[in-house]
Amino acid sequence: MSAGGMLPGLVATACRVLAADGQDHFCFGHVSARGADGGLFVKAVGPSLARVTTARVAEISPDGSLRTPGLRLHEETALHQAVYAARPDVGAVVHTHPLAVQSATTLGPLPDGVFSQDEVPFAAGLAWYDDADLVADTARAQGFATCLGGARGALLRAHGLVTVGADVAEATALALLLHRAVSVRLAAMAVGRPRPLPPVTLDRLRGAFEAGHRGRMTAIWADACAGIGAAAGDGEGDGEDR
């Protein structure tokens, strides 16, 4: 099967992985992957993340037209399109609304610093998007992409998280790490004042993480897929909606 043929299955698997991590939110949240022709594959309106199958992954052409009859796009598909337009390095985008992240982002930007090992991948910068409205039109989507810049992820005020990666595995693994990092921060803030990692320790951790970044992303993705009984490869066998 071609890489393009694998993408709907990978998007569907990523949705279910994120749901198993506690990032489900009724019918909201979405994952996308850039197609080989410059289009994209993205979760369609309807099921929760936990129930997404390949039949619920829409294909959008490079000119923005829907290639999948019978499916309806989330309003925030614009967010995905704007990120791909601004970031040629990005092959996949995750946007979810975990309870811990929504709660933490009502407080405003997180305090500066890195407070846990799960935050280390975002040590170079985690974007903060201060508009709590839906990123559902071209102007807001372009504003979000500008805000994201070259970062691996963003927190959206009272809204949720976005992570990006070279492929579905990386974007999803980063979403799992960011969800955990924010959850750790929120739990620590509830009982005291968390202390950031010392600069020397952080430098060591960053060096080790970046040296093995690709392997870590692949391992996290493979383990998460195994946890839901899915293959970490092409996502085949998803079946129809049930």
Image (tube, rainbow, N blue to C red):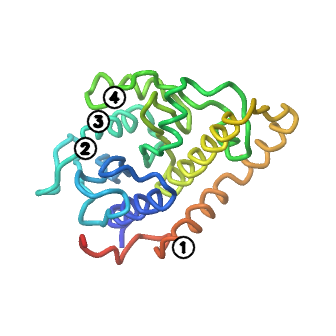
- Give the x, y percent position of residue 148: 49, 29
**Mark 3 or mark 1: whose residue is earlier in sequence:** 3
The answer for how far apart the CA atoms under marks 1 and 4 are is 34 Å
Question: Does the CB distance between marks 3 and 1 fall below 8 Å?
Answer: no
- From the viewer's perspective, is the residue at label 1 or at label 4 nearer? 1
Q: Which mark, by number, is residue 74?
A: 2
Residue type at mark 2?
His
- Which one is in front, 108 or 177? 108
- The residue that label 1 is drawn on is 226
Report the mark closest to the observer, 3 or 1: 1
Image quadrant in which the C terminus is located? bottom left
On the image, numbered disc 3 is attached to which residue? Answer: 78
Using the numbered discs, state the Cα–Cα distance from disc 1 to disc 2 in whole angstroms: 28 Å
Q: Which residue is mark 4?
A: 141
Q: Quadrant of residue 139?
A: top left
1 or 4: tag closer to the N-terminus: 4
Q: Element type at marker 1? A: helix
Please state which amino acid type lies under the numbered disc 3. Ala
Q: Give the secondary structure at mark 3.
A: helix
Residue at x 38% of width, y 22% of height: 143
Point out the frontmost of discs 2 and 3: 2
Q: Which numbered disc, 2 or 4, marks the residue that appears first in the sequence?
A: 2
Alpha carbon of mark 3 to alpha carbon of mark 1: how far? 31 Å
Q: Are marks 3 and 4 in contact (CB under 8 Å)?
A: yes
In the image, what residue occupies the spot 33% across and 51% down? 26
What is the number of callouts on the image? Answer: 4
> Which residue in the rendered view is the most extreme toward the right?
200
At x 34%, y 28%, the residue is: 141
Dot 2 crowding, Cα within 10 Å, few <14, some 14–19, many 20+: some
Give the amino acid at mark 4: Ala
Give the crowd class for mark 3: few <14, some 14-19, many >=20 residues within 10 Å: some
